Image (spheres, rainbow, N blue to C red):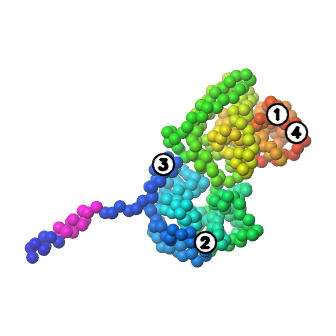
Amino acid sequence: MKTRYIILPLLAFLCLQAPRAQEPKLDFDFFGEKIQLPALSVIGTAENNLISPGAITDFVNHLNLQDHGALIKSLLELKEKYQLDNWLYYQLIRKTAGTISPKSANYARYTLYKWFLLTRSGFDATIKISDEKILFYIRTDDQVYNIPAYYKDGRQYVCLNYHDYGNHIDFNTEAFSEMNLPLPDNRQAFSYRITKLPEFKTAVYEEKDIQFNYYQNDYHFTIKLNPAVKTIFANYPVLDYASYFNIPLSQETYRSLIPLLKKNTSGMSVKGGVDYLMRFTRYAFMFKPDAENFGAEKRLSPEQTLLYGESDCEDRAALFFFLVREIYNLPMIVLAYPQHVTIAIKFEKPIGKSILYNGEKYSVCDPTPQKEDLALGQLLPSLAKTGFEVVYAYQPNR
């Protein structure tokens, strides 16, 4: 009897001291950061059998039964920690969903995980299906072009995964219906605006040599660029000009370029410095239309224009705008002609034939190479009698 009373407390002690099995984790790389998140169980079989109302409803009901609170909490904490704008947070959601259920193994299931994680993070998203396809829509108040959208209750929903179908679906011959799936309350609109790029680790940057000639003087630059920026914007849609022109450079790229340009223009007048920046943007990169470069319209952010060896007038306008704003912070307007986009700047005294906008005179400064070498204040002769639209106006004090 004594032996039994001694053994039982000993067994209890050993049970308390035994190491607990580690909870499963999701591990992946997110633009150089090692991410570890609480796991979710994979639901469903490996077959791509979720393109039906019943199968999708059952799948989502099973997902709701899981304890997903810890995962959503961790994702939102990472959003806050790294100050991720909505588009960057969506890239984190994509990585998470792909780690739970690889895209190549079951596309429908992967898409539903993205929808689930995004809606449980507080965003308003919907699912539409046809007999063979599943489309994932997000509510946004932004102006978004070149991707499918629909309106419901006066709100705009745009498609997040149209690119997975080659950016081509014939909606006239293929009918889609919206799934009525359970959603949390207090859902918010998604914004595509990017105010901050990730703080990439220095080691992942690559050096790029850039050169151009400025009035018989050769200038050579070695700047640091991160190829991951191409990944971030791979499926980024065409937005309004204000959204694109205000996308910042990543920190290391900024540090490698802006101080150098400030140094090179430090002894110049404002007009001379702007002329230098205009010609740098004009001649340091090859010109190529989007149709030839990407097969479709694509607006590049300033850093993408630095990354790609070739770009068009819209891309150069965005880079030139960014450089002038950072170094001189002058009032600017973006002029959109039927086949051309350029910049006009408000100097203390206008140069050449000025553009009158809101009672102020702006001088055209074209950062795109033309057949003739345009100076400050010169507009392409072919555009002299062509109408234009001011698609974005920048005022430093706003």
For this view, does 185 lie left or right of residue 19?
Answer: right
State which region is magenta. 9-19
- The N terminus is located in which quarter? bottom left
Q: Earlier in the sequence, mark 4 or mark 1?
A: 1
- Eye-nearest disc, 1 or 3: 1
N-term mark: 4 or 3: 3
Q: Where is mark 2, residue-wise?
A: 51
Q: Residue at x 63, y 51 (%)?
A: 234
The amino acid marked with disc number 2 is Ile
Q: Position of residue 167 (x, y in %)?
A: 69, 58
Location of mark 4 (residue): 382
User: Within the image, what quadrant is residue 107 found in?
Assistant: bottom right
Q: Residue at x 69, y 29 (%)?
A: 212
Mark 1–mark 2 Cα distance, whole angstroms, equals 54 Å
Q: Return the disc, 1 or 3, that comes first in the chain's sequence.
A: 3
Give the spatial CA distance, label 4 vs label 2.
Answer: 53 Å
Mark 1–mark 2 CB contact (< 8 Å): no
Relative to residue 59, is residue 332 depicted above or below? above
Amino acid type, callout 1: Lys
User: What residue is disc 3 on?
Assistant: 33
Are circles 4 and 2 on residues that touch, CB within 8 Å?
Answer: no
